[in-house]
Image: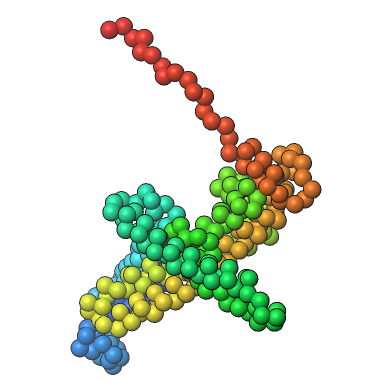
Amino acid sequence: MGGLLAALGSKLTEQWVSLLALPGAFYLAVAASARTLGHAHALDPVFLADTITAHAADPRVDTLGGQVAVFAAIVVGSAAVGLLAQALGGLIERLWLASDWQGWPPPLPRLIERWVAARHEHWAARRRTLDEAAHFHDGQRGSALVSYRGAYDQMARISPEAPARPTWCGDRLNAITLRLQRDHDLDVAVVWPYLWLILPAEVTTQVSAARLDLTRTIGLAAWAVLYLPLAVWWWPSALITVVLGAISWWKTRTATHTYAILIEATIRLHAGDVANRLGIEHTGLLTTHVGAELTRRLQGSLPPNVAPPTNTTAA
């Protein structure tokens, strides 16, 4: 038990350092440098070094107590900034994936609905091009296949399925629900929690790692937002924001695609295991009958329609 607690504590410490402390400490260093350099000495390392040396020679910092106080302030400050970035990352993830955009405060749903409609129109045009490529025949099978793949890639750059969310990442995750509903009559939101409980450890490890990677890449966007206010003092901070934002956008699309592939593959391969646990007869294939029966048994029954309690208290 002691070994387990030690290992758990070591793991938590490692995650705290990598996710919060180090990025937070780097942010504090950049913020201090930005406040010191300003726009006039934005790219002057000599001025920065001289200023740091002068502050280090201050008697209040040169003592042991002063150094401990500075170190404690850095640790607390870096953790606080890291927690702020983590909270901001959660908000950005909700906005980026936009699974509940219809319930956002007005007028956002009305504006997003127009954007989704425009994306859908653009996607429909690419979908028609894909149909034309599928029926294209010029006697050369190879060129027809290349044309079809190119048309599909152009469509998938907008969304792999008909757009229902304002972002590509949101539609990529929503495509899992649409495909499994269409192909197997299976409700992912109902079946997934039960499936997760019986998955092999190696599968849950891969899926969890993919989800953590998605969270981290979206977290880069949070850091990009935090670096932007520093541009008021130090203009290179705006470049840091642009670079981090671009990296986050590119890596988040990749991480979303990887995570979606793993989720869909896991459900298609292991939904039969849930069916076996529930005694649903099947031949090993995830058919529409199996999917519909899984959904029906796992979604629960409706609450009884009973009359409201009457007030019997005497007046």
Lateral position of residue 109 relative to residue 255, left or right: left
Q: Looking at this rendering, what residue extends furthest in the front direction?
A: 138
Lateral position of residue 231 relative to residue 252, left or right: left
**Residue at 39% across / 64% down in the picture?**
118
Quadrant (top left, top right, bottom left, bottom right) of the C terminus? top left
**Residue at 55% across / 48% down in the picture?**
189
**Residue at 36% across / 78% down in the picture?**
242
Based on the displayed image, in which of its 4 quarters is residue 221 positioned?
Answer: bottom left
**Residue at 20% across / 88% down in the picture?**
40
Confirm whether residue 32 shows in the render.
no
Decide: is 140 above or below 278.
below
Lateral position of residue 34 relative to residue 120, left or right: left
Based on the displayed image, in which of its 4 quarters is residue 45 positioned?
Answer: bottom left
Confirm whether residue 161 shows in the render.
yes
Lateral position of residue 26 relative to residue 232, left or right: right
Q: 1 or 231: which is nearer to us?
A: 231
Q: Position of residue 184 (x, y in %)?
A: 65, 50
What colouring style does the render use?
Answer: rainbow
Q: Looking at this rendering, what residue extends furthest in the left direction?
A: 40
Q: How many numbered marks are there?
A: 0
Q: Position of residue 68 (x, y in %)?
A: 34, 70
Q: Looking at this rendering, what residue extends furthest in the right direction?
A: 283
Q: Position of residue 244 (x, y in %)?
A: 40, 76
Q: 16 or 56: which is nearer to us?
A: 16
Q: Position of residue 217 (x, y in %)?
A: 47, 69
